[in-house]
């Protein structure tokens, strides 16, 4: 990762440190600040405007023990497993590993049949969900947008944990694939939220009026995401 500091210098200390770390230049800070991003599971170093690369590296090294202990305390991440029950776009399905089925991943009633070796099960399930998410969320977004006279250009499914969705002024909406695992009223709220950004780029009262118009039960979804959203980050 290369970061251009505000001083114009290029800052890349990942290799020197031998760990994955995010470096964020800060305009307002006067000292180095180290935090752990719990969602992305990565240390984040905020670097003030005037700071040498040597100082930054030694600061992280001084705090390496703290980084390791704090990272070790993060809740474990998990993979999808055979027999696991998940909510997929609001529908309960059970992951059924069937090594010889030769079907890739196929949904049959309440079963999600996954073929191939066990070592590929997680990746296969995740890829399937991502693909489905693209189709489902694109069509939901397009139909909600129509109600307010807006057009969706495209929907992209992302892996980020920093936000559930985002919307550019050009009609492009991004969603995190993990939202597919939330109850359907939560998904509807998120779509209503992002689609409303097509009209309002802020979170003004007009924006929330638009969300309300698109999905009157939005509040439950909003509260669920705040309270339980992080439980979906456990998936790798
Ligand atoms: Zn928003």
Image (tube, rainbow, N blue to C red):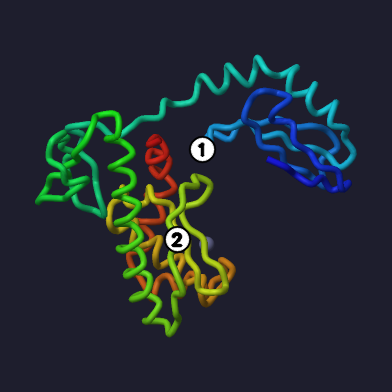
Instruction: Tell me where residue 180 appears, x and y as whole percent.
Output: 32, 52
Instruction: Tell me where residue 145 appears, x and y as whole percent.
Output: 40, 77
- Say above or below: 230 vs 217: above
Q: Quadrant of the C terminus?
A: top left
Instruction: Decide: few, some or many residues near mark 2? Use Cα within 10 Å; few <14, some 14-19, many ≥20.
Output: some
Query: Is the residue at mark 2 in contact range of ligand 1, meaning its CB lies under 8 Å from it?
Result: no
Which residue is at the far bottom? 149
Q: CA distance from mark 1 to mark 2?
A: 20 Å
Pick the front one: 49 or 158: 158
Pick the front one: 94 or 36: 94
Secondary element under disc 2, as helix, strand or loop, is: strand
Q: Earlier in the sequence, mark 1 or mark 2?
A: 1
Quadrant in which residue 134 is drawn: bottom left
Q: Viewed as shown, does residue 208 lie left or right of 191?
A: right
Pick the front one: 209 or 92: 92
- Say above or below: 125 vs 169: above
Q: Viewed as shown, does residue 20 lie left or right of 205?
A: right
- Say above or below: 124 vs 19: below
Pick the front one: 181 or 120: 120
Q: Quadrant of the N terminus?
A: top right
> Could you tell me which residue is drawn at 41 percent across and 25 percent down?
76
> Could you tell me which residue is drawn at 21 percent across and 45 percent down?
104
- Say above or below: 231 vs 143: above
Q: Which residue is mark 2?
A: 156
Q: Which residue is mark 1?
A: 39
> Could you tell me which residue is drawn at 48 percent across and 69 percent down?
208
Q: Viewed as shown, does residue 121 lie left or right of 145?
A: left
Secondary element under disc 1, as helix, strand or loop, is: loop
């Amino acid at each position: 990762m290369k970061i251009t500091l505000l001083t114009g210098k290029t800052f890349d200390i990942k290799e020197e440190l031998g760990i994955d770390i995010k470096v964020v230049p800060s305009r307002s800070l006067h000292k180095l600040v180290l935090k752990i991003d719990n969602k992305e599971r990565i240390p984040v170093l905020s670097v003030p405007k005037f700071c040498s690369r040597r100082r930054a590296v030694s600061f992280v090294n001084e705090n390496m023990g703290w980084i390791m202990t704090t990272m070790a305390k993060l809740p474990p991440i998990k993979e999808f497993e055979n027999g696991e029950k998940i909510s997929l776009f609001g529908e309960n399905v059970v992951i059924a590993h069937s090594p010889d089925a030769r079907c890739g991943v196929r949904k049959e009633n309440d079963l999600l049949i996954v073929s191939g070796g066990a070592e590929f099960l997680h990746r296969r399930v995740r890829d399937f969900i991502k693909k489905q998410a693209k189709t489902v969320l694109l069509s939901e977004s397009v139909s909600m947008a129509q109600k307010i006279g807006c057009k969706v250009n495209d929907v992209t499914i992302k892996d980020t944990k920093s936000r559930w969705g985002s919307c550019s002024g050009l009609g492009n909406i991004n969603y995190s694939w993990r939202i597919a695992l939330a109850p359907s009223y939560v998904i509807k709220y998120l779509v209503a939220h992002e689609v409303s950004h097509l009209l309002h780029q802020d979170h003004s009262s007009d924006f929330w009026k638009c969300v309300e118009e698109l999905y009157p039960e939005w509040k439950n979804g909003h509260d669920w995401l705040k309270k339980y959203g992080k439980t979906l980050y456990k998936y790798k």
